[in-house]
Image (cartoon, rainbow, N blue to C red):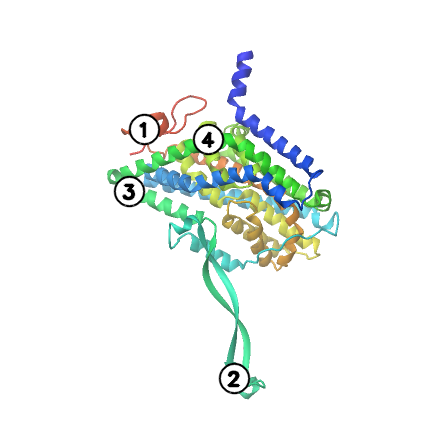
């Protein structure tokens, strides 16, 4: 009996450490609030330092992980199989995202959080305005970067400026006292903004992997190179994961300390928070598991337990992209998902699948309308659902990226963008929960796509490599102990 307990503790040591980290982080944060003020920025900056190291290490691994995993997966699969797998992946992501939006709209219309609670919510910060059409063009433009190397640290955005134009009027009716007409026009240009263009990297990797698959034996050496890169990257992920509980403690503590008035914030936005959290809970524990059961006939909660490490990391870091390495590892080690499916599905999911973000944007938009007394008709509610789905796809997998894309939803239904400041004070808290839901949605997607694609995954003969088989294949099925990954040619 004692040996079983010891083995169980060893097997779940990291999960236990992460749960302890969340509890300690909350306790440390609330404890320091009684000692420090939110304005002691230097102390808070130093307190966050171990957490910043964790975020840096996780973000460092995003680029090699996405490139190596997608190219290896595409290069190892039959072209027809990868096409069908890609279609299933996109259909699943679009379906779950849209269902999350509908769920959010139903809850916010039913609960009416904007008509309840305090009407003197403190506004914080200033939103970044975004034109819907510009945002759509930026999304498409970033799929095809002009410089692949630069896309690792810059992305393209539409910049809008103003300039005065002087026009000589040919007709007397338009002539001013000065003899000219003065007016202001927009100046449009494409500029580079700081931030990784993950979408462009994903598109390039998919196409390169597809070409290597078509090349057959001629492309095999390059496929093997990226396969080795993927295995090496996952070894680095192992090292970072064991440091993650330390980083999570200080990320949570620092965020709690820097909040100015925690009690007033929760009191004023209580109904809004309840609406968002209820939607995320229903989507995570009812909608997604139900979809998983329908397609796989397997226990969804056992699958969810296997993703606990990734979910806790997503909650602590509030970044689905930064959690990607751990998401892949949990899928392969704990849930036995074929690594080729994991390498194909999860990088795409971390880029475009944002169930939690979509639900939050729908709820937040209608909450703002209710709060300011603006009634949305049926057509405008439909517009909210469509634009929230599209905006969530364009949201980056980084902390609070949904705030930027939510301006698209507000603009689409004529709501004032400045009113987004109503929810800024609580966004950091809700962002953690919706990120966890985003990661869980990615994970269920990988399980479903693998089940549906089990007959399409091509079995490739073993090839001789200097890397040992267990390292080359990366991970083992936790239940059977057998290698789940066929080596690619």
- Circle 3 sits in a helix, a strand or a loop, which is it? helix
Q: Secondary structure at mark 4?
A: helix
Separation (CA) of disc 2 from disc 3: 62 Å
In terms of depth relative to the viewer, which is nearer, 232 or 129? 232
Q: Residue at x 55, y 31 (%)?
A: 245
Image-based side of 406 in relation to 189, left or right: right
**Disc number lying in front (1 or 3):** 1
Q: Which residue is mark 1?
A: 467
| Residue that numbered label 3 is attached to | 214
Q: Nearer the viewer, mark 4 or mark 1?
A: 4
Residue matched to label 2: 169
Q: Please report whichever mark, 2 or 3, sits nearer to the chain's N-terminal start.
A: 2
Mark 2 or mark 4: whose residue is earlier in sequence: 2
Residue in the image at 58% along x and 50% along y: 403
Of residue 365 and residue 153, the one placed in the foreground of this image is: 153
Q: Secondary structure at mark 1?
A: loop
Q: Residues within 10 Å of mark 1 (few under 14, many from 20)?
A: few
- Which residue is disc 4 drawn over? 239
* Residue 328 visible to the viewer: yes
Q: Give yes or no for contact between labels 2 and 3 (Cβ–Cβ under 8 Å).
A: no
């Amino acid at each position: 009996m004692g040996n079983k307990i010891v083995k169980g503790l060893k097997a779940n040591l990291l999960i236990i450490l992460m749960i302890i980290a969340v509890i300690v982080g909350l306790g440390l944060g609330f404890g320091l609030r009684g000692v420090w003020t939110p304005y002691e920025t230097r102390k808070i900056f130093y307190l966050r330092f171990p957490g910043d190291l964790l975020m840096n290490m996780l973000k460092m691994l995003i680029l090699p992980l996405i490139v190596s995993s997608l190219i290896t997966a595409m290069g190892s699969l039959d072209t027809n199989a990868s096409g069908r797998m890609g279609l299933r992946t996109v259909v699943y992501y679009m379906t779950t995202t849209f269902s999350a939006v509908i769920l959010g709209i139903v809850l916010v219309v039913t609960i009416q959080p904007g008509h309840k609670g305090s009407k003197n919510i403190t506004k914080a910060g200033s939103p970044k305005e975004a034109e819907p059409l510009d945002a759509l063009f930026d999304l498409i433009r970033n799929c095809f970067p002009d410089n692949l190397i630069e896309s690792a640290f810059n992305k393209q955005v539409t910049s809008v400026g103003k300039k005065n134009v002087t026009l000589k009027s040919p007709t007397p009716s338009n002539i001013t006292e000065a003899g000219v007409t003065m007016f202001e026009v927009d100046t449009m240009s494409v500029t580079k903004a700081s931030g990784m263009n993950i979408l462009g990297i994903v598109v390039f990797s998919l196409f390169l992997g597809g070409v290597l698959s078509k090349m057959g034996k001629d492309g095999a050496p390059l496929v093997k190179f990226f396969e080795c890169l993927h295995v090496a990257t996952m070894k680095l992920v192992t090292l970072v994961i064991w440091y993650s509980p330390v980083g999570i403690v200080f990320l949570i503590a620092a965020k709690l300390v820097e909040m100015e008035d925690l009690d007033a914030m929760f009191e004023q936005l209580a109904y809004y928070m309840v609406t968002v959290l209820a939607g995320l809970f229903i989507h995570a524990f009812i909608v997604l598991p139900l979809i998983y059961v329908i397609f796989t006939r397997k226990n969804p909660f056992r699958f969810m337990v296997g993703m606990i490490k990734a979910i806790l990391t997503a909650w602590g870091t509030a970044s689905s992209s930064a959690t990607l390495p751990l998401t892949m590892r949990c899928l392969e080690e704990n849930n036995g998902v074929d690594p080729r499916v994991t390498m194909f599905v999860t990088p795409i999911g971390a880029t475009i699948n944002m169930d939690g973000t979509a639900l939050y944007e729908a709820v937040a938009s209608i909450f703002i309308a209710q709060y300011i007394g603006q009634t949305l008709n049926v057509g405008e509610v439909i517009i909210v659902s469509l634009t929230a789905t599209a905006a969530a796809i364009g949201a980056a997998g980084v902390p609070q990226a949904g705030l930027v894309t939510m301006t698209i939803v507000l603009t689409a239904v004529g709501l004032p963008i400045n009113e987004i400041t109503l929810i800024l004070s609580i966004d950091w808290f809700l962002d953690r929960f919706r990120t966890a839901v985003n990661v869980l949605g990615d994970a269920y997607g990988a399980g479903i796509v693998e089940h549906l694609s089990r007959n399409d995954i091509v079995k490739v003969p073993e090839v001789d490599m200097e890397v040992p088989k267990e390292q080359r294949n990366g991970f083992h099925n936790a239940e059977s102990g057998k290698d789940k990954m066929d080596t690619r040619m």
